[in-house]
Amino acid sequence: MIGDEIAGMLGDPLMQRALLAALLVGLAAPVIGTYLVQRRLSLLGDGIGHVALTGVALGWLVGNAMNLVPHDVLAVPGAIVTAIIGAVVIELVRERGRTSGDVALALLFYGGIAGGVLLISLAGGTNANLMAYLFGSISTVSTGDLWLTVILTAIILVVGIGLRTALFAVCHDEEFARAAGLPVRVLNITIAVVAALTVTVSMRVVGLLLVSALMIVPVAVAQLVASSFRQTMGIAMAIGVVVCVTGLSITYWRDLSPGATIVVIAIAVYAVVALARPLLVRSRSHDPHPQVPDDVEVAA
Amino acid sequence: MTPAVLARGVRVVLSGNVILRGIDLSVNDGEVVALLGANGSGKSTLVRALVGAVPIESGEVELLGKPLGGAVDWSRIGYVPQRVSAATGVPTTAGEVVTSGLLHGHRLRPPRHARRLVLDALELVGLTHHLDRPVRELSGGQQQRVLIARALVRDPALLVLDEPVAGVDLPSQEAFATTLGALTARGRTVLVVLHELGAIAPLVQRAVVLRHGAVVHDGAPPTPAREHGDPDHDHVHPHDPDEAFADTGVAGLRWEP
């Protein structure tokens, strides 16, 4: 029976941890994604994800050199540190405006992947070792991993929701924020660092190559139906949770990649909502034209 | 008395080009000053430099008696950037845009009674009913008014506006002039960048005219013999504005592409 199957899934400790991690990631990723879409930096998550791969390999290399067991114990801390550095560098490059944003991101993409592959071979590993990080490995989430996920998610939610008006102000109109004396650079770096934390926290669930999808696709869906920034963020968080938990649950019965399943479901949701949008958004009953007198005299 | 705005020798260089070459400007408390000049004369850059939105290479700026930076009381300054649209990537309501105007300096969260302040500001620009409307659904003139409400929401003593009525329909321009008139009657200081004086002309006490990044006129507002709107106004747009307006001292003032 379906009920027994679900009870079986929920009773599996491995699955419990994985589901909890997926739920937290689904909740946190769209928060920062909303700000990135607002400032048209949807691909920033990808750039950070690629850099984080170098961090994973670096952690591995250091762990190896120090003879730590297991060798990859430093992989996640390595990813966190490198992702934060990478995100801050992207932000500073963007602020200076010397290199256009997309070229800076492109350099990071290539540098991150190449650096990761190079370092992992130096560490005596194979590219197969990187696969778990590239495409996710949620089935191996340990209790320690889960605690790290809980802490990072809490930071993301507190900053992303607590400072919403300030982060919105700087993403919406940076010039105005400067003219209001707001600490624009600090706020920009805050967004970059929180984006880096989001990338590393989502890494276990969907993998570095698909991290950005989890940040952006739920926001893209929410945008179709929401009318406010606050609503967009809320709907995106709900969609994030639903697709993460659903996608992961499917992999309990079918041997599929969790990350890929989650992202495909998210994109399917986007397609369905985009097609059904004319039905969902009720037609505005009022006249959209502002009630102002004519500029010109019109002959009767 | 401390001037509301004081600039000494402001020089701004943007990507290698000298945009402003040593501007001196002061705006006294309660004064309404128009900043005029042809497209590309540097008037927008000047106001952006004054409020700290673009870096100054040399020179000094004081706002409300404090050097530009953390010491300035940003809660008393409202800025309206030159913008075609208030809409951005993510759906945003007029109320949310105006709420962001409540933040300044180290105030990173809106105050508790934010909603009432936002409604009051929207009322000043006649958009109370649009609080929860997405800005992308509003007309260009209405979006401009949302940005003006964002500057007014903190009840500023000094208002800096960059072409607030550019591309806005005539009734909106007149509504804006009325709002501005009410503010100046309450002793607010206004520095406004304009392409032409238009509906705001009666309020302007002094005009500063820029050309090629330098001040060429500072005094009584120029009164062109014929306004743009005048049916007899001859739309001569010479390629060399200096030639056509050389004797007025406000060369290029009414130049339009």
Image (tube, coloured by chain):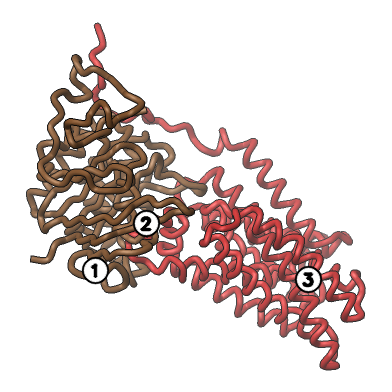
Same chain under badges 2 and 1? The reply is yes
Q: Could you tell me which secondary element the residue under label 3 belongs to?
A: helix
Same chain under badges 3 and 1? The reply is no
What is the quadrant of residue B37 in the picture? top left
Q: Amino acid at mark 2?
A: Val
Residue at 21% x, 53% y is B159
Instruction: Return the residue nearer the eye: A57 or B49.
Output: B49
Q: Could you tell me which secondary element the residue under label 1 belongs to?
A: loop
Quarter of the figure with the C terminus of chain B: top left
Give the alpha-carbon distance from disc 2 to disc 1, as whole Å: 23 Å
Q: Are marks 3 and 1 in contact (CB under 8 Å)?
A: no
What is the quadrant of residue B11 in the picture? bottom left
Instruction: Return the residue nearer the eye: B16 or A90.
Output: B16
Task: Assess disc 2: are there few (<14), some (14-19) or many (≥20) residues with their C-alpha within 10 Å of its C-alpha.
Answer: many
| In this view, A146 is above or below B99 | below
Which is more foreground, mark 2 or mark 1? Answer: 2
Pinpoint residue A10: horizontal percent, then vertical percent.
75, 71
Colour that chain B carries in the picture: brown
Q: Which residue is mark 3?
A: A138
Quarter of the figure with the N terminus of chain B: bottom left
| Residue B73 numbered mark, or none | 1
Q: Which residue is mark 2?
A: B12
Task: Assess disc 1: are there few (<14), some (14-19) or many (≥20) residues with their C-alpha within 10 Å of its C-alpha.
Answer: some
Colour that chain A carries in the picture: red
Q: Please state the chain letter of the residue tagged with numbered disc 1 in the rendered image.
A: B
